[in-house]
Image (cartoon, rainbow, N blue to C red):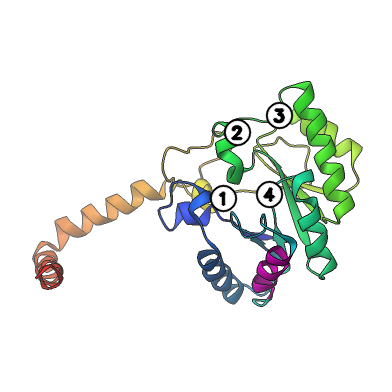
């Protein structure tokens, strides 16, 4: 399974949070992934304010992703978006839910913090899961939830659960490729992801190697770049 996440706006487009990512940007990234892969189950993230306004907007925007032959869309939130989920599912579009730490609600949560640490928050989480299941989701992504709470959830609900920083008691793990490859952005450096490479360091080493071994060629390219910049400045 491949999730085309709105986090791509941070990893690829330099956004500070996923709140800045819009529909056009998500559609471009989704189309690129769909064209490059015709064997995986592809889920597209619906960005902030693409589904929150009303059912018609939610269904219309979900349908735009499906035109690229993806398999499903993902929405953040529980009971408060269950009506949107049902409308999209009723339109024939599969939906994945997303609970726990939901980055599109980061302002309300006060930052990137672990969820489900109090009795009341666990009760709310259970209610949200029940609402999403009744609305028709085929699976739910749990983010930043203690391992023991995830185990409690998966024992009580008959649906596929995926996790990102939610422990081992899930049906599948979601890993952001930039995290796994050590190509971090901003101040986020998740502790739960094994770093198989440090591509940031490799990139700078390659640039340094090129500079040291191709200095005359580098000067030539530098002159062209500066000339182009000066052309636009004038």
Q: Sort mark 3 into few (<14), some (14-19) or many (20+) by Cα contacts within 10 Å.
A: some
**Drawn side of residue 186 relative to residue 115, left or right:** left
- The tag on residue 109 is 2
Name which residue lies at 59% across and 43% down: 103
Residue position marked by numbered label 1 in the rendering: 176
Crowdedness of circle 4 by 10 Å Cα count: few (<14), some, many (20+)? many
The stretch of residues the image draws in magenta is 56-66
Q: Does the magenta stretch include residue 112?
A: no
Spatial separation of the CA atoms under disc 3 and disc 4: 19 Å
- Residue at 83 percent of width and 56 percent of height: 138
Q: Where is residue 3 in the image (x, y as percent from the top left)?
A: 64, 58
Q: Which residue is drawn at 44% across and 45% down?
A: 184
The reply to whether the C-beta atoms of the residues labelled 4 and 1 are less than 8 Å apart is: no
Residue 193 in view of the camera: no
Q: Which of marks 4 and 1 is in front?
A: 4
Quarter in which the C terminus is drawn: bottom left
Whether pointer 3 and pointer 4 mark residues with C-beta atoms closer than 8 Å, the reply is no
Give the mark, 2 or 4, whose residue is nearer the N terminus.
4
For discs 2 and 1, the disc positioned in front in the rendered view: 2
Find residue 139 and name its label: none
* Main secondary-structure element of the magenta-colored stretch: helix
Mark 3 and mark 4 lie on one chain; the one further toward the N terminus is: 4
Q: Nearer the viewer, mark 3 or mark 4?
A: 4
**Residue named by callout 4:** 76
Could you tell me residue 56's position as x and y percent?
A: 72, 66
Residue located 68% across and 65% down the image: 57
In this view, the residue in front, 75 or 153, is 75
Q: Do the residues labelled 2 and 1 touch (CB within 8 Å)?
A: no
SS for callout 4 = loop
x%, y% of residue 203? Answer: 33, 53
Residue 164 seen anywhere in this rendered image of the structure: yes
């Amino acid at each position: 399974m491949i999730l085309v996440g709105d986090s791509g706006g941070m990893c690829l487009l330099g956004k500070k949070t996923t709140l800045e990512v819009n529909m056009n940007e998500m559609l471009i990234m989704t189309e690129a992934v769909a064209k490059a892969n015709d064997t995986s189950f592809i889920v597209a993230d619906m960005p902030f304010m693409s589904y929150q306004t009303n059912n018609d907007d939610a269904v219309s925007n979900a349908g735009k992703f499906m035109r690229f032959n993806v398999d499903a869309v993902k929405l953040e939130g529980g009971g408060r978006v269950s009506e949107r989920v049902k409308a999209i599912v009723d339109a024939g579009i599969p939906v994945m839910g997303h609970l726990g730490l939901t980055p599109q609600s980061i302002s309300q949560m006060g930052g990137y913090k672990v969820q489900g640490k109090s009795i009341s928050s666990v009760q709310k989480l259970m209610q949200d899961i029940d609402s999403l299941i009744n609305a028709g989701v085929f699976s739910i992504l749990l983010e930043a939830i203690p391992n023991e709470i995830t185990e409690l959830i998966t024992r009580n609900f008959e649906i596929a659960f995926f996790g990102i920083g939610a422990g081992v008691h899930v049906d599948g793990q979601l890993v952001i490729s930039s995290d796994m490859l050590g190509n971090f952005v901003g101040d986020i450096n998740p502790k739960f992801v094994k770093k198989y490479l440090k591509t940031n360091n490799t990139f700078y080493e390659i640039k340094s190697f090129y500079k040291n071994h191709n200095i005359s060629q580098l000067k030539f390219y530098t002159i062209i770049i500066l000339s182009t910049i000066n052309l636009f400045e004038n």
